[in-house]
Amino acid sequence: MPSFLKKNKKLVILFSLLLFHMILISIQVPRGKEGTYFESFIFAVFSPVQNGVVALCQSVNRIWNDYFYLREVRVQNRRLNTEVTQLRQENTLLQSLLKNYEKQNEVQEFLSDISEDLVHCRIIGFDMSNAFKSVVINRGSHHGLKKNMVVLDEKGHVVGRMVDPITFYQATVQLITDHKSGVSVVKQGGNSVGILSGNNTQMCEMKYILSTDEEVHTGDVIVTTGHDGIFPPHLKVGMVSSVQTTPGLFKKIKVRPYFQVNQLHQLAVIKTNANIVF
Amino acid sequence: MKKYIYILLTILVVFIVYTFLGRISPEIPVALNLFTIMVVYLAVLDGEVMGAVFGAVCGLIQDSFSLGVFGVAGIATTLMGYLAGFISRKIYVISFFKIFLFIFTMSSFQLIVWKLIHSFVFSEPVFSESHVILSQPFFNALVGSALFPFFRKIFQSVSSDSL
């Protein structure tokens, strides 16, 4: 037996590596979508590198812009941009939520709560297999972020939700354009509830709308329903770009999300559990 | 020992370059897989065992920064690394056109294996993804064959020092 191993040393190494991978894949089956410790470990080791590279790029960019071009105006503009972004995010959330709160004191209480519950972050990396699947952000469990928290873009539109792996200072966000994502959505002001799912491209698909349904049309705004227990209701998701009636039971509805992956920079995470606040 | 430190540094540099390319456009790291290029390089220069081990490490790094089942890219890259090392022992792949063709073939093989396992695990059609990834073998071959002489010089100097 040892002579056989010695003779086929290279093949033994190959099969050991393949077996190792098989075991890694197998142990994920009972864990479901929960990440393994090994995966979290690799993510924790390399994500700070990503964070460092992005910080360095931004610093170089900032130095160039600040010191060589219109220093004062740039600084002021950046501050105002950040402020506008935060106000837009808060405004979008508040507009959709004010309907739920009739009493003035409840509104005041909520205003202070929601402002504290938004964690602003920036993207430091994109999914290695497909940029439309996930992004890595520079905030993690240290900032109070947890799995399934909802992530918004600069204008307060839905981008995705937090998924594993989440480390102290970095975390992964599953985009709504991912093939495996699912969001309960409805036409704004309508009743046709469907499931919005990505197809690993810039477009999403609104599923399970009956062919007999005449409510959804091109140009309609799609918002969350809150039925999935993850995404709060009334958040804008995207706009219907095409509606096709198929011979099957359901219509084929394409939805264009409001964000574009290559233009995403700043994001905001809603820290509070959606079921409690909304 | 020096060689292994050099390999670890290579992984780090590739990861930094990958992050930097992602800053320019998120689709560049999908179209150009620097990890695959490095696995082919090391397999050609050091043999199938190095190709398989380095492939496993690089594949798992890619898996941890990608949604989906952890280990799928690892299997594809391990197999590709081993095969690249094995074939490069049988044929001479140092010239520009041969290394271009070699990297193209190896990248295509890796992509096919990854796609097949991915489709099997997730029960989804083979071509459900964005088509950018299909250009990966070409860009890998183009960039890989252009940088190969430079990398070979560095690797050979490090290897001779360690001996």
Image (cartoon, coloured by chain):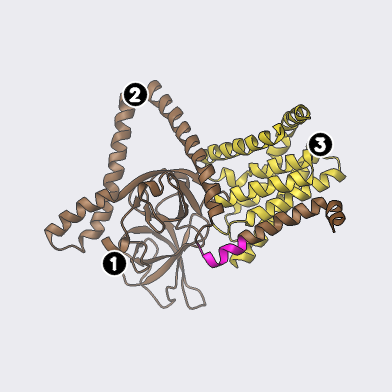
Is the N terminus of chain B in the top left, top right, bottom left or bottom right quadrant? top right
- Tag 3 and tag 1, C-beta contact below 8 Å: no
**Residue beneath disc 3:** B94
Label 1 element class: loop
Residue A26 in magenta?
yes
Q: Are marks 1 and 2 on the same chain?
A: yes
Q: Mark 2 — on which chain does it sit?
A: A
**Residue beneath disc 1:** A189
Q: Are marks 3 and 2 on the same chain?
A: no
Q: Mark 3 — on which chain does it sit?
A: B
Q: Residues within 10 Å of mark 3 (few under 14, many from 20)?
A: some
Q: Amino acid at mark 1?
A: Gly
Residue lying at the far top of the rendered structure: A68
Which is closer to the viewer, label 1 or label 2?
A: 2
Residue A189 in magenta?
no
> What is the quadrant of residue B2 in the picture?
top right
Q: Amino acid at mark 3?
A: Ile
Q: Could you tell me how far apart the alpha carbons at marks 3 and 1 are, in whole angstroms?
A: 65 Å
Label 2 element class: helix
Which is closer to the viewer, label 3 or label 1?
A: 3
Q: Could you tell me how far apart the alpha carbons at marks 1 and 2 are, in whole angstroms?
A: 46 Å
Q: Residues within 10 Å of mark 1 (few under 14, many from 20)?
A: few
Give the vertical position of B25 relative to A100 (above or below): above
Q: Percent from the top left, x then y, of residue A21?
A: 66, 57
Q: How many numbered discs?
A: 3
